[in-house]
Amino acid sequence: MTLSDPKHKRVTIIGGSIGGLFAGLFLRKAGWQVDIYERVPDEIKSRGAGIVTHAPLFDALRRIDAMPDGDVGVAVEGRRVFASDGVVTGSLPFPQVLTSWDRLYRLLYDRFPRERYHQGRSLISIAQQDDEVVATFDDGRVIRSDLLIGADGHRSTVRMQYAPEVQPEYAGYVAWRGLVQESALSPDTREALFRHFSFSLPEREQMLGYPVAGANEDMRLGHRRYNFVWYRPADERTELRRLLTDKNGNSNGMSVAPTAIHPDVLGELRSEANRRLSPQFTEIVHRTELPMIQPIYDVTSKQVVFDRVILLGDAAFVARPHCGMGVTKAAQDASALFDALTEQPDIDRALARYQAERVPFGTRVVQHAQALGRYMQAQIASAEERRAAEIYRTPEAVMKETAASAFLEDYATSVAH
Ligand SMILES: Cc1cc2nc3c(=O)[nH]c(=O)nc-3n(C[C@H](O)[C@H](O)[C@H](O)COP(=O)(O)OP(=O)(O)OC[C@H]3O[C@@H](n4cnc5c(N)ncnc54)[C@H](O)[C@@H]3O)c2cc1C
């Protein structure tokens, strides 16, 4: 089938988060009739907090005319490592812009037509008949289109139907995350932390943090917030279960709402901060009102195209957050799909090209993030694995590799040859 016939250019996107919106805006630019279906009934509220940016994210925003005139986020000049006594033991010039999930979501959501963004609609199943994709939703509605994009996150319903064997694999550690108001911090801590992307490196753990905009994208001094992520090992059968059991004694699978975290667990988090982190980061943990806990997963797909159904963003690959690539990768997936569909008139060939590009790329990002985080895993199989893991434990390696995209340059070179 070629794409010159306009009536064959209907696309259904499942998931209206960052990946779905990037895909929607790119495909509208390519002339497709796009409808996004999002399970959450109201406007999606903040997921996590800080987002690291990389050059390809800005390229993608520019390509869909979503790059704002003002700042995308807060700029820092470099990186620092704090020892447990608060002394700076390493530094690296590394200018970078740190933004937030809310900021990116709004940039995209505000550009997508409201009447084509359908909220409170959850995909149940998909059938493919005669070059048409038929999607059935929880309210019984059936939507037909020429292409369906699963941008429905790491537990993707779309992926579960086409590749049920691909499951999120727990990495052996969790991330505690949180945001604290700049104004709630002592002058010394503000001075130490707000111009850099900083780390504290207790044995087999990693604390990192950076400044982000305040409420309503406020970037004024004194009105910003500080975002932290503290990685800690947690054995799946014992410690993880305990951490995720809520204050009423209920265990709800692999997550717990921040307001339901057991007070004993929060108390321990704060006392562990006293024991293990630099004083600046200890203060950050103590002043954070609602810390969140997220188990860390890997998702690796071998296939991202199933006839006229494709996977994109976290539905296709989830890399541990150490390269800070989740949002950038979703934007690149959407950008690559646009290129394939606009440069290749035959849809099957275009989708084959998307798969040929995105599977090796996603696999590379997942593997690199695994290497960066391996030393924090609760269990490491062998001494050899532990030795390999230690390469990325030094302050120099942590500063150079975390939330950095230099490894992609090697990847681009290897693909080009
Ligand atoms: C600790 C941590 C730190 C991170 N830090 C960074 C960072 O610094 N930089 C970065 O780029 N990324 C980071 N990420 C990852 C980033 O948040 C995601 O990769 C990114 O948001 C892309 O997600 P997505 O749109 O593909 O999926 P999601 O954001 O998960 O969205 C999926 C959407 O699909 C909807 N949905 C699900 N099922 C259905 C259904 N059946 N029907 C309809 N809708 C459905 C959901 O409601 C949701 O809105 C981090 C992640 C974690 C856990």
Image (cartoon, rainbow, N blue to C red):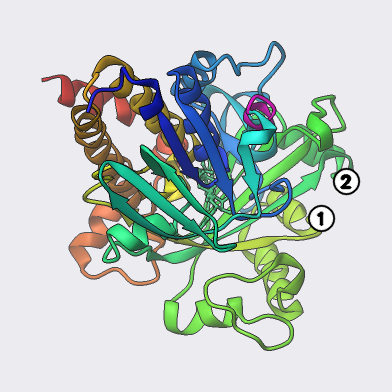
Name the spot of residue 295 as percent of width and height, x first. 51, 64
Can residue 165 be seen here? The reply is yes
* Relative vertical location of residue 140 with respect to residue 53 in this rendering, above or below: below
Residue 195 is tagged as none
Question: Quarter of the image containing the C terminus?
Answer: top left
> Label 1 sits on what residue type?
Arg
- Near-viewer residue (359 or 244): 359
Q: Quadrant of residue 408?
A: top left
Q: Which residue is mark 1?
A: 287
Crowd class of label 1 (few under 14; some 14 to 19; many from 20; radius 10 Å): some
Residue 264 located within the stretch drawn in magenta: no
The CB of the residue at mark 1 lies under 8 Å from ligand 1:
no
Q: Quadrant of residue 344?
A: top left
- For the residues bearing labels 1 and 2, Cβ distance under 8 angstroms: yes
Classify mark 2: helix, strand or loop. helix
Q: Residue furthest left?
A: 417
Name the spot of residue 396 as percent of width and height, x first. 42, 37
Residue in the picture at 86% in, 37% down = 187
Classify mark 1: helix, strand or loop. helix
Residue in the picture at 57% in, 14% down = 65
Residue in the picture at 34% in, 64% down = 167
Residue in the picture at 51% in, 32% down = 34
Between the residue at mark 1 and the residue at mark 2, the CA separation in whole angstroms equals: 7 Å
Q: Which of disc 2 and disc 1 is earlier in sequence? A: 2
> Label 2 sits on what residue type?
Ala
Can residue 87 be seen here? The reply is no
The segment highlighted magenta reads 106-112
Name the spot of residue 384 as percent of width and height, x first. 18, 61
- Near-viewer residue (170 or 172): 170
Q: Is residue 236 left or right of residue 361?
A: right
- Near-viewer residue (184 or 215): 215
Q: Which residue is mark 2?
A: 184
